[in-house]
Image (cartoon, helix red, strand yellow):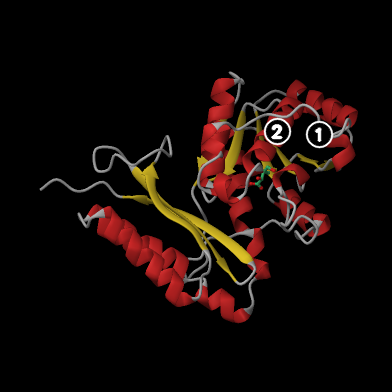
Amino acid sequence: MQIIRGKDELADALADLRSSGGTVALVPTMGALHAGHMALISEARRLARHVVASIFVNPTQFGPNEDLDRYPRRVASDSAMLEQEGCAILWAPDAATMYPDGVEATVRAGKLGEDLDGAARPGHFDGVATVVARLLDQVRPDVALFGEKDYQQLAVIRQLVRDLALPVEIVGVPTQRDADGLALSSRNIYLSGEERIAARALPRALGEAARAVSEGEPVAEALAKARETLARAGFAPIDYVELRDSETLGPAGFPARPARLLAAAYLGKTRLIDNLPVPLRKRS
Ligand code: PAF
């Protein structure tokens, strides 16, 4: 695997890959890789001949009081994992390479990026859209893969690609979970032992609410119970627990249309997010 930090070097390495034939997949990451990222890489290998992963802790998607400085950085162990998984190129630019003129021209995520996580983290999805547009332009992959754990991010990126008519297929990969249900996240390492145990309440609350809604319980009641479960486990504040349309993330039209339950809440200083599909009601 080649580890590349400069744009010219990247262009040369991509030209070499392309000349050997076959398609290219891109897996954008911010590093601190775990089994969730490895599932993206393995799906990328299934879909394309060559896999490029990127690691860039993107400053433009962090708010002023967020965890940019303490975000885990471990390029050595990350690159060993990527190499073992059969990645051809690790694209690891620094901020000056990604934003050579500072952050002048940006991409706005639009309405979709202002709701839910975007309301709690103003500007976050503009930062994501800006860096993803640059990564797609730098690598020009045939396919790019993102985890469903960041479900709103995936929707924002799909919209970006549609609006700009970018020639790339966006693929969402299901969330990977620990044995107790907690979604894998690079930020889970911030949790204390006690918080890690309490964190199980998040997938449990969503699972119970998803089941209740799919069995016909009024949505408001199911969501209120999920909030109670989270509050009892020590989550505070709870940014949102919402049922939304799976595709548009607008108001849910369940059960006529597929829906998604999404939640974000703090355990101590750590903000956790998760989401689950709501099974459509079985017709009897
Ligand atoms: O999901 C992430 O790790 C990041 O938001 C992404 C897509 C790599 C953009 O920085």
Q: Is the Cβ of the residue at disc 1 closer than 8 Å to that at disc 2? A: yes
Q: Residues within 10 Å of mark 2 (few under 14, many from 20)?
A: many
Give the secondary structure at mark 2. helix
Could you tell me the amino acid type at mark 2?
Thr
- Which of the image's four quarters has the N terminus? top right
Q: Nearer the viewer, residue 180 or 43?
A: 180
Q: Which residue is depicted at the point 22% across and 57% down?
A: 217
- Kindly identify which numbered label has been placed on residue 75: none
Q: Nearer the viewer, residue 162 or 68?
A: 68
Question: In the picture shown, does residue 28 fall above or below 107?
Answer: below
Q: Is residue 212 left or right of residue 62?
A: left
Question: In the picture shown, does residue 103 fall above or below 271?
Answer: above
Write down the residue under mark 2: 130
Furthest toward the left, the residue is 284
Question: Measured from the top left, where is residue 208 in percent x and y?
Answer: 33, 64
Could you tell me the amino acid type at mark 1?
Val
Question: In the picture shown, does residue 70 fall above or below 175?
Answer: below
Question: Measured from the top left, where is residue 152 in percent x and y?
Answer: 52, 43
- Residue 103, by quadrant, is top right
- Residue 47, by quadrant, is top right
Q: Is residue 5 visible?
A: no
Give the secondary structure at mark 1. loop
- Kindly identify which numbered label has been placed on residue 103: 1
